[in-house]
Image (cartoon, helix red, strand yellow):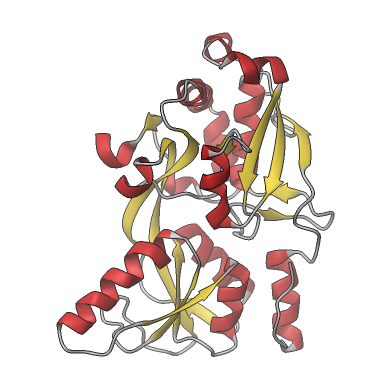
Amino acid sequence: MRINFALPVLVVATALMLSGCVDNSTPSTNNGGGNLDVGTDAAAIALLPDDIKEAGVLVIGIDPTYAPNEYKDDAGNPIGWEVDLGNAMAAKLGLETQYQPSSFDKIIPSVTGGSYDIGLSSFTDNEEREKIVDFVNYYEAGIQWAQVIGADVDPANACGMTVAVQTATYEETDELPAKSQECTDAGKEPIDILKFDTQDEATNALALGRADAMSADSPITQYAVSQVADKIELAGESFDTAPYGIVVQKDSDLAAALQAALQSMVDDGTYKSILEDWGVFSGAVASITINAATTS
């Protein structure tokens, strides 16, 4: 993917780092676990649906534009801490991984339609999504805003501001519309929600001054700020912590198998090792759950 507007040289380098100028349609197949020797878990394997067990491959929908969770290396292969987690989870199940790059908003329909076995792309588990799919919960992330350096943005008082966001994320579908409604209910100007297909475009819009602020999941915002540190900075602390979940078809036996594999990784330290390597352990969970938005 490429940014479609002219960028200063400094921001171009960042855009390339964040997005990767490569073909986004080519599947990537890996042997599960990457460089980690995680072993298999017989109890988890026994829970796998027969068709996936026989295929030996877990087909994963991913939007690799959300660094450091999932993005692309120079060769166009998906990388990130969630990719490492997915590879290790598949290894526990005796499976290989095949990543299918996709726009974020197409992943859930592709899972429900049977094109992908799962969606692993920083999905916030909420009640509306649980009406359509099930979630295997593996992480807790908050929302965090960024601003141009020196600005005075308050996420709790953003009426009349322009806020950049990736389309179909929780921030675009839930957080910002709710905040904007509060503004108009109080007789104030609404929030102008500036939507982009990819997170790197939203980040660059802020860096270029096209937006007053940016809203994304806390690990994403923190990473984006580290990449454009002379242009943008954090705007306050993270808030509204919510669970990430792997997307699976509603009432599929696959959910229990993924839960067992991930819990095995929590118990043997693999999970902790991956999160610590990427500097995101602050959102770690002790227990892998299913549909935490409605069952917790």
Q: With 278 as the anchor, is 236 left or right in this view?
A: left
Question: Residue, x 69% and y 23% (percent of image)?
Answer: 95
Please identify the quarter of the rendering in which residue 13 is found. bottom right
Report which quarter residue 199 is drawn in: bottom right
Q: Position of residue 203 (x, y in %)?
A: 57, 75
Q: Which of 258 and 141 is in front in this view?
A: 258
User: 271 and 56: which one is in front?
Assistant: 56
For image coordinates 32% across by 89% down, the residue present is 160
Residue 246 position in % (x across, y down): 49, 39
Side of 29 where 143 appears, left or right: left
Residue 277 appears in view = no
In the rendered image, the vertical position of residue 210 relative to residue 274, given as above or below: below
Residue 123, horizontal then vertical, whole percent: 47, 49
Viewer-closest of 25 and 99: 25
Question: Eyeballing the image, is 174 above or below 69?
Answer: below
Q: In which quarter of the image is the N terminus?
A: bottom right
Look at the image and tell me whether residue 134 can be seen.
yes
